Image (cartoon, grey):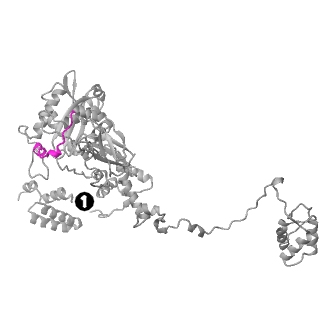
Amino acid sequence: MSTKGVVDMAITPDIREYLVELARQLDVAGHGQRGQLLDGAKAFLGWSTATIYRQLRSECGWSAGRKARSDKGSTSVAKESLEMLGAIQRESLRDNGKQTMFTTTARSILEQNGIHLGVSNAHLNRLIAARNLNVSSQRNASPVQHLRAPHPNYLHQIDPSLCLVYYLKGRQHIMRDSEFYKNKLENFAKVKLKVWRYVKYESASGALTVRYFEAAGENQHTLFEFLMYAWGKQEGRLMHGVPKFLLWDKGSANTSSAIKNLLKHLEVEPLEHEAGNARAKGGVEGGNNIVETQFESRLRFQPVNDIAELNAAAQAWAEAYNANLIPHQDTRLRRAGLAEPVARYDLWQLIRAEQLRLLPPVEVCRALMTSREQERTVNADLTIQFKHQNADRSLFYSVRGLDGIVIGGKVVVRSLAYGDCAIQVEAPRYDGETLIYRLEPNRNYDVYGQQLDAAVPGQEYKSLPETAIEHAAKTMDELAFPEQDAKAARAKQVTPFGGQLDTHGHLQQIEHPTYLPRSGSEIDTPEHLRTDAQLLTTMQALLRIADALGRNLTAEENTWLRGAFKDGVPEDQVQSLIDRFTRPVAAAPVANTGGLRAV
């Protein structure tokens, strides 16, 4: 076997595995043993020594002069330090993905903050890469989430991009990097009306729609015009119809109240991907690239004079591309789940009639975009009255049985484009969340204008379905009066909850703390309101006090009492005297002022 033939031949997995094992053995073998290993490899592979070394280097990264590291399989750098090194570099990423700090700077910062790494920067790069802590690994941390559309026109993706083509003085120009980028951005500013490319990607079939507009920038007027073109039925174009969901970015035009109002009327739910995550709508991103490389590249060789000619050419190209009719070019859709490539329009035509929602006239859509939601009060019969734009008079809509809606309550109403004069009703729920309902008007009336489902007296009785309020009331009645008629129980004044609720009896069992008594002052009563207390003679007072004390007063007590109360002892002060003589305090004779004073 020639050496050249072996080098040119692709290495099979089995041979690569053999080379990897040989490299491991050579790393640990001594000088004499290496020769034996190489001789065995030459005999087995039929290669020269030079070829074996070359393949070991290219396939395994092994070098003959390189010794295995003494710390192979381990590192002296702490795990936490490596994570800190990776975190600093990760936080240096700009929104556009550019890395602004690398290991050299990050390592310097860590060392300054007392975190010693102890190995070379190259070794640090290898260590953080092996642990997926480096920026390159983190960029790929979020895998692409595939989106599936169950049928055509279920999900549309749209995205505007600035086109390389522009027009000045009736002549087509194509932007060149040397004229418009780097230090010559002022040239770009001179082009006041730039050409914007709007692309729609139909997720189920992969079919593309493209339209160009001259404008200074993105705006809601241009977006409205594109939606009308993309969803309306155009002459010479197969695909049309309004989707259920619309995926776009958070551009100012997309989030404008007018555009969102239009989508609500058309029952299209907008989905906004996270800022900076364009991969979320990868279908339309790829569609923009297809348009730029496969259509706009043709304009360099066959210029068009204005936007009208550009759009005519773009529609012709898109129709041919979607139908796989471009001469000598295969534009069929290729997906892993398809047994073989399929033309995009062949897939789109699988749409069923109920899935194809036709766009109302542009004038109606413009009115829907500017129309405002209206507030209505719920009537006593749980209906609301509303004039739909497709009706010649006001219609009544039943809201009975809908959660969050009560008699006399307010609801927000907007007309919808599809259905029998359908409307959308919004009502606030108890937790602040908005409840949304889709209703169509009551049409079930007899020739007299009466509801056909109403009860006929003498023939039938129809109980109305419970409202949310009535259901809640019934639940509470069953709790208060189990297995009883609540109305009758109230009339008989039956105690609710079987009298098992202790509502005040427990208050008598409360143990109150002992409070220190607070001294007060008597209020002076006017003379004409005072009631004079009855006076006892000194002897009467002495007898009552002695009886209470169980002893006679001492001579000193007797003398003091007679001197203090010469005119007699007021009856209401006898108890105070008893207390005094029971717990004697230092007393001083005072004049007869009608009371005692402790000193």
- Spot occupied by residue 483 in the image (x, y as percentages of width and height): 39, 67
Residue, disc 1: 66
Residue type at the position of mark 1 = Arg
Of 242 and 71, which appears nearest the observer? 242
Magenta stretch: give its range. 344-361
- Residue 482 lies, with reference to residue 549, above or below; the image says above
Q: Position of residue 351 (x, y in %)?
A: 14, 46
Q: Is residue 128 magenta-colored?
A: no
Residue at image coords 37%, 53%? 87
Extreme residue toward the front, this view: 458
The N terminus sits in image quarter: bottom left
* Total tally of numbered discs in the picture: 1
Viewer can see residue 77: no
- Which residue is at the far bottom? 550
Q: Quadrant of residue 394?
A: top left
Please tell me whether residue 348 belongs to the stretch shown in magenta.
Answer: yes
Q: Residues within 10 Å of mark 1 (few under 14, many from 20)?
A: few
Residue 208 locus on image (x, y percent): 16, 40
Residue 480 in view (yes/no): yes
Picture residue at 36% right of the left edge, 40% below the top: 375
Which residue of the protein is positioned furthest toward the top in this rendering?
A: 169
Q: Is residue 317 left or right of residue 379?
A: left
Q: Nearer the viewer, residue 400 or 9?
A: 400
Q: Secondary structure at mark 1?
A: loop
Residue 199 vertical placement versus 62 (above, below) = above
Q: Nearer the viewer, residue 378 or 139?
A: 378
Q: Is residue 308 left or right of residue 553?
A: left
Looking at the rendered image, the quarter that the C terminus falls into is bottom right
Q: Is residue 38 above or below residue 222?
A: below
